Amino acid sequence: MTLDQIFSSSVTLTVRALALLIAVFSVMPVVQASDAIRCGSRLVTVESRAADILAACGEPDFRDVQSYGGLGLPDEIAESERWTYNFGSNKLLQVLHLRNGRLSKIETGGYGFPKAEAGDCSASFIVEGLSKYRLLETCGEPLTRRDIGYVTTLRPTYRQNFGGISQSHGHYALEVYREEWVYNFGSRRFLRIVILEDGVVADVQNGGRGFNPR
């Protein structure tokens, strides 16, 4: 192999690696908290009522209710909800946390995306860190879903990498809302068991053999 061929091969591998990194980071949540967001000419701040948010920003693209059972009326606000606004691929998703009908926290959830991407789903697409909103928009409803409810889990205080091996140091208790979704990708693949915590994929496992719908 000549030097030109080696150089060309190295450039190709670098470009492919960069493209892969861009694809991964585009679906990973970028968790940054803020106290306000602007919708047009109106500002929405922490402690705003749900009605004020709707007046300023309109209906959210995705409304995630964390409670047992369904709501009674369409306009009823649950004790705990997460609203996601998708303002397009050039802006970050805005994730608004509501507690008892008031805005308690604002976070970003990775870059937005055009709705045309919906339906481009595969088993390998479902990875840890994927938001529930993007999972639904891309893969649709799961075969089954189960609400486990609020559970207490241990999270590492911080992590360190030694030679590519991640090690956790210390833990703290955190209450999260856990769900289990199962996706079927046909008889040639295993079922994908997806564990979501607070609207984000926390774990993905293989189940039994999938099946072809009749």
Image: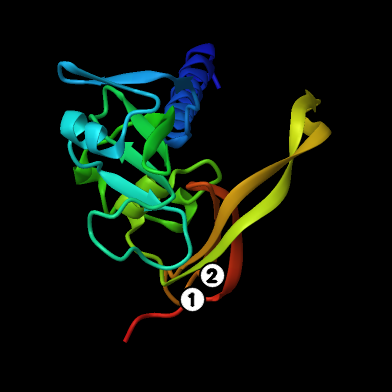
Q: Position of residue 11 (x, y in %)?
A: 47, 18
**Marks 2 and 1 close (CB-CB < 8 Å):** yes
Q: Is residue 26 visible?
A: no
Graded by Cα atoms within 10 Å as few (under 14), some (14 to 19) or many (20 or more), the crowding at tag 1 reads some
Q: Describe the element under mark 2 as helix, strand or loop.
A: strand
Name which residue lies at 17% across and 33% down: 55
Q: How far apart are the two marked residues, 2 and 1, measured between alpha carbons? A: 5 Å
Q: Nearer the viewer, residue 37 or 45?
A: 45
Q: Residues within 10 Å of mark 2 (few under 14, many from 20)?
A: some
Residue 170 image position (x, y, % from top left): 84, 32
Residue labelled with disc 2: 190
Considering depth in this image, is 159 or 37 the residue closer to the camera?
A: 37
Where residue 173 appears, as percent x and y from the top left, is: 74, 41
In the orientation shown, which residue stands out farthest toward the bottom? Answer: 214
Dot 2 amino acid type: Phe
Instruction: Quickly name the residue at label 1.
Output: 210
